[in-house]
Image (cartoon, rainbow, N blue to C red):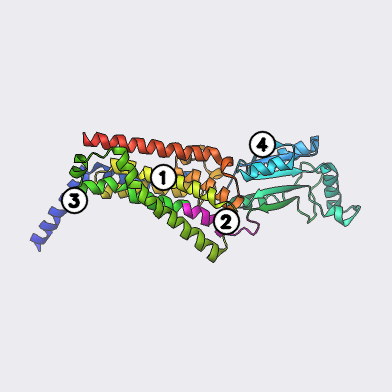
Amino acid sequence: MIKSLYRIQAIFLKELTQLKRDKMTFAMVIMIPLVQLILFGYAINTNVRHIPVAVVDLSQSALSRVLVQTVAATQVVTFSEQFYDIESAHAALEQAEIRAVLIIPQDVSQRIARHASVGFGLPASSDEETSRPIAQWLVDGSDTMIAGAIKGLRNMPLAELLSKPSNRTIPTFEVTLLYNPEQRTAVNIVPGLVGIILTMTMIMFTSAAIVREREHGNMEMLITTPIRPIELMLGKIIPYIFIGLLQVSIILGLGYMLFSAPINGGLWALFCITLLFIAASLTLGLVISTIATNQLQSMQMTIFVLLPSILLSGFMFPYEGMPLIAQYIAEALPATHFMRLVRGVILRDVGFTDMLPDVYWLSLFTIAGLAIASLRFKKNLD
């Protein structure tokens, strides 16, 4: 029994020594729970605030300006844009520059007066007039959390605009949900799931590509061949591009058949943005593969990238609800840009040219990733 304990102790000490020497694994043991704690405790916020919205003030009166200030004082929304016609505001809503539009009608003063008169028990001119809300919200309903936050303003009291609180049951604002009027979660989840699954599988496949060659003893053979580093990198990622496209077809096809998730945009635009994102994810995996020394380290680094991609990209929690620092980190992740692109194409039928900033970013990320992976591979060969 004592000899058995000595043997267990020897193996125990060996594992501790091995872990101490493997600095990458030890760092991941510390960093993964630390990152999760910071993300969930600081960056993730289900209580959405400061949603970027626009206003179309058709009244241009002092009362309408007070109305905008009253709504902004709730801190649920932040008026970042002002348009002078509904068409321009709707275009900005389609391109995800804003998440909602407050439309203030020309007769807002009369509506507020009728709103107050009914609350005081005074007679109104007609039932049609008394049933009209003061203003209207047009909301991007593809994100159910954001839609729910703005719907919470539907019965917002306007004590600042009225001499007494209103007792009426007619809502203060009319709320119209676009792109997902039924607020079905699947409509928002299915396109986002494309980005998460591609992030997980594409990075996982290629993060072990160079490491696998080294562990299998194929590195010497690659050194003796005339292949260039950039040629090796391209040869490594091209097969997985077809796998990624197959995964997208499965997700969107089953999402349409099982959950009636719509595909409103053009298939060509969807193909182009998916191809860009697959290439960006594969090159990120290649960079990881040139840093890791074994497949365990490549797997740990993949998880380290995957966690922020799931939590900060807008897949589970609204991007607008995150602190500014978390938004900066999210902007560095390919998944964040792809979430905007795929939801824009699938849900809002946004044109490819209307999303050029995200397209440019994914393109530059892919080129930079290939360059870094090629240089690091060449450096390792030397």
Q: CA distance from mark 3 to mark 2?
A: 52 Å
Quadrant containing the N terminus is bottom left
Pointer 3 or 4: first along the chain: 3
Figure quadrant of residue 101: top right
Pointer 3 or 1: first along the chain: 3
Mark 2 Cα shell of 10 Å, populated few (<14), some (14-19), many (≥20): many
Which element is circle 2 on? Answer: loop
Which element is circle 4 on? Answer: strand
Of discs 3 and 1, which sits in the foreground?
Answer: 1
Q: CA distance from mark 3 to mark 4?
A: 59 Å
Of discs 1 and 4, which sits in the foreground?
Answer: 1
Task: Tell me the residue at 50%/43% (across/down).
Answer: 337
Give, as a single range, the part of the protein colored magenta: 180-194
Q: Which label belongs to residue 15? A: 3
Of discs 4 and 2, which sits in the foreground?
Answer: 2
- Relative placement, left or right, of 11 versus 187 is left
